[in-house]
Amino acid sequence: MNIKTSIEICMISGLMLAQGAFAQATEEAEVKKRMPNIVVVMADDMGWGDSGTYGHKVIKTPSMDRLAARGMKFNQGYSACGVCSPSRAAILTGRTPYRNGVWRHLSGHHEAHLRRSEITYPELLKTVGYETCHVGKWHLLSKQQFGNSKYPQPGEQGGYDYWMASHNNAEPSHKNPKNFIRNGEPVGEVNAYSAPFVADEAIHWLKEVRDDSKPFALSVWFHEPHKPIATDINFSGLYPDEDAKDSTYYGNITQLDFALGKIMEALDTEGLTENTLLIFTSDNGPVPGVGGDTGGLRGGKRSDFEGGIRVPFIASWPGHIKAGSLSDIPVVGTDIFSTVLDMVDVGEPKDRTIDGVSMLPVFKGERVERKIPLFWRTHVSGAECRVAVRDGDWKVVCDDTMTKFMLFNVQKDWQEKNDLAESMPEKLGEMKALLVKTWKDISEEGPNEWWENEKNKPMKGAVNSY
């Protein structure tokens, strides 16, 4: 073999190696591009009965109807808490609120926040090539901490590459809010209503900002229908036969539904729907005094009766969830964390307790086995129902002191009208023991220095701020 031939062979070999490396890189890029996208859309204070999709006779929610027709509607979908900050933290971390540290609503001045030590699913998705975005309400810091670099912001702690958020409510109302921050910079007053504006920001990111060679995780957390409510006449005007209060509230739900529809349409036009898990839910139950409807469930926001924690919950993922399916299997916001990681084959953190379970079997109509029962504790002192645990069809609820207990079979008695505590003392004892054990495990792991001094104190002046 002469030198020329040897050089030619080396060149050919090098070219083949380069071609092989290019092909492998291209294949890896294609695999990443085919990984499922994740979109989680959340309403604020929307009740189980606050939509035509869940049976309201007046409220029009065509986008929710369409989403349910594409996927699965859950009749027993839950938030992780009866108020919003804790339920939001649970979605991101897969950990029940008192365990992850966001155990109460975070308005005004308070030291609690989503801790740097917590791991969110957007953070974990970024390790396998996902791009991430959050738009809308945040509420995982106290008001004085939001926008303060001394505390973890949505980009740092949430794991979001791009974010535009308000601390809590849209201020001064849903109309022309002026309290959004985008990637650390104030947005200023906007000439729009909150939900459509938030949807437009999400669509801007989808179409113009994100790297379309990567899979993505998008959180869209609307403010509607949390007060102070403001509704575009185009939506309140859809209810001319209702009084001013009802037409404003009903229209506010339809305004939210319109914004959801904009997100769905953008996914359609970008060719993303087929490869996207889209979940719609609410952070907690409604406030009847504002106009909210529990759909006949007992209690409401701030309660751990079903009306405070059972919420709209719809999931669509074409090819994986049967279109138009209906489920009575209980799921909770905490499960979103485990589900997302299971979808992309990313392992859950091993150094902490994860309370959620993957919903992938539920999407196929199969029940899941929970090692940790469904548990709720809502921090508002002195009320009838503030702690609850559900195991199978059974649910025990009690007051904040954990001394007064009620027992329900919520599969049969979904309105919690028939307290079986006296007639079924053995079952009550079994469920009480489960509740006490679950609470003990949670309280030992959580940062209890943040709540120990407050657990039996009313939150003075806070009732109207969250």
Image (spheres, rainbow, N blue to C red):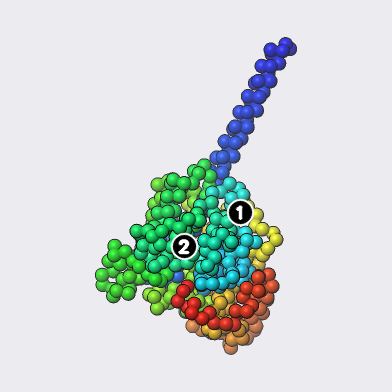
Compared with 397, 337 (above or below) is: above
Task: Name which residue type carries label 1.
Answer: Leu
State left or right for residue 380 relative to residue 223.
right
Residue drawn at x 52%, y 49% as measured from the top left: 216
Q: Mark 1, residues whose alpha carbon is within 10 Å: few (<14), some, or many (≥20)?
A: some
Residue 457 in which image quadrant: bottom right
Q: Nearer the viewer, residue 136 or 274?
A: 136
Q: Are marks 1 and 2 in contact (CB under 8 Å)?
A: no
Residue at image mark 2: 166
Residue drawn at x 61%, y 28% as measured from the top left: 19
Q: Nearer the viewer, residue 97 or 360?
A: 97
Task: Name which residue type carries label 2.
Answer: Ser
Residue at image mark 1: 124
Compared with 274, 459 (above or below) is: below
* Residue 204 horizontal/vertical position (percent): 42, 50
Select label 1 or label 2 by which is in front.
2
Residue drawn at x 60%, y 79% as measured from the top left: 455
* Residue 126 horizontal/vertical position (percent): 59, 50
> Farthest left residue?
240
Q: Is residue 336 visible?
A: no
Dot 2 falls on a residue whose secondary structure is strand
Residue drawn at x 65%, y 83% as measured from the top left: 429
Q: Which mark is residue 4?
A: none
The Cα–Cα distance between marks 1 and 2, rounded to whole angstroms, is 24 Å
Whichever of callouts 1 and 2 sits on the residue coming sooner in the sequence is: 1
Q: Mark 2, residues whose alpha carbon is within 10 Å: few (<14), some, or many (≥20)?
A: many
Image quadrant occupied by the N terminus: top right
Compared with 68, 464 (above or below) is: below
Dot 1 falls on a residue whose secondary structure is helix
